[in-house]
Amino acid sequence: MNTDERPEVDPDALLMQQAGENDNRDAFEQIYCRYYPMVIAFLARHEADRGRLDDLAQEVFRRAWQHRRRCRSYRRASMFLTGIARNVIRENSKRRKRDIVCRRLDDTAPAHKPVTHETPVTVAQRREAHRDIHQGMRRLPSKQREAVNLADLEQVSKREAARRTGCSLKAFCQRLALGRSRLRVLLKHLNR
C-alpha cells in the first residue's frame, strides 16, 4: 500500500489513544495544553457569560478524560473535544433556562441574586426543584404548558407567543396565568 493512500491520523489522536489505553495522564496533559485555547474559543462563541468559560472548559476536559477510551473512533482529537463542548453548551443552556423558570416561579427570591458557594445540599435541592418543575409541567394541560414554556423557558414576548399559538393576546395571557397558577399548586403538592 502506498503511504500517500493512508488516511491522515492526527498525532494528538494518538496521544488520546495512549491516554485511553494506558490511562496516561502525561499524554492527556499534552492534549489539554494544546487544545485548551481552541476549546475556550469554541465555548466563547456560544456562551455570553465570559466568567463561566473556564468552568465550562474544565467540564469539557473532565468528560474527555472520563470518555477517553471512545476517542479511538475519532481521527482528530479536535473533533472529539468539539463534540463534547457542544454537549456541555447544550446542557448549560437547558440548565440556565430551568433556573430562569425556578426564579420566576419563586416570588420570594430576587432574580438578581447570584448563586454562591453551593453546598452538596443546595445542589441537591436545586436538582430536586428542577425535577419537580419538569414533572409539574408534564401535568399541565397542553395549551397552558405551551404558554408557560414559551413565556418562561423560551422567553418569547407575550405578543409573539400569542401569534405562535394562534390565539389572541388576551387568551394567551389567560392561559399563561392559569398555567403558572396551576404549576405553583402542583409544585406545592409535589413538595409534600
Image (cartoon, grey):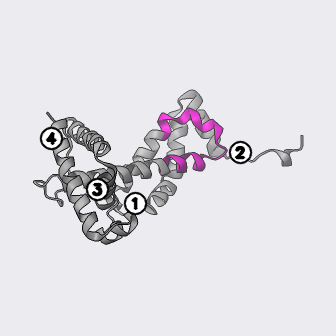
Helix, strand or loop at mark 4: helix
Q: Amino acid at mark 3?
A: Val
Per the model, the C-alpha gap separating discs 2 and 1 is: 31 Å
Q: Is residue 95 above or below residue 63?
A: below
Q: Amino acid at mark 1?
A: Glu
Residue for point 49% across, 58% down: 42
**Residue corresponding to mark 3:** 148
Res. 60 in view = yes
- Tag 1 or tag 2, which sits nearer the N-term? 2
- Tag 3 or tag 1, which sits nearer the N-term? 1
- Tag 4 or tag 2, which sits nearer the N-term? 2
Among all residues in the image, which is located at the extreme left? 108
Q: Amino acid at mark 4?
A: Lys
**Taking 70 as reference, is 45 left or right?**
left
Which residues lie in the magenta part? 64-85
Q: Which mark is residue 47?
A: 1
Per the model, the C-alpha gap separating discs 1 and 3 is: 25 Å
**Residue corresponding to mark 4:** 188
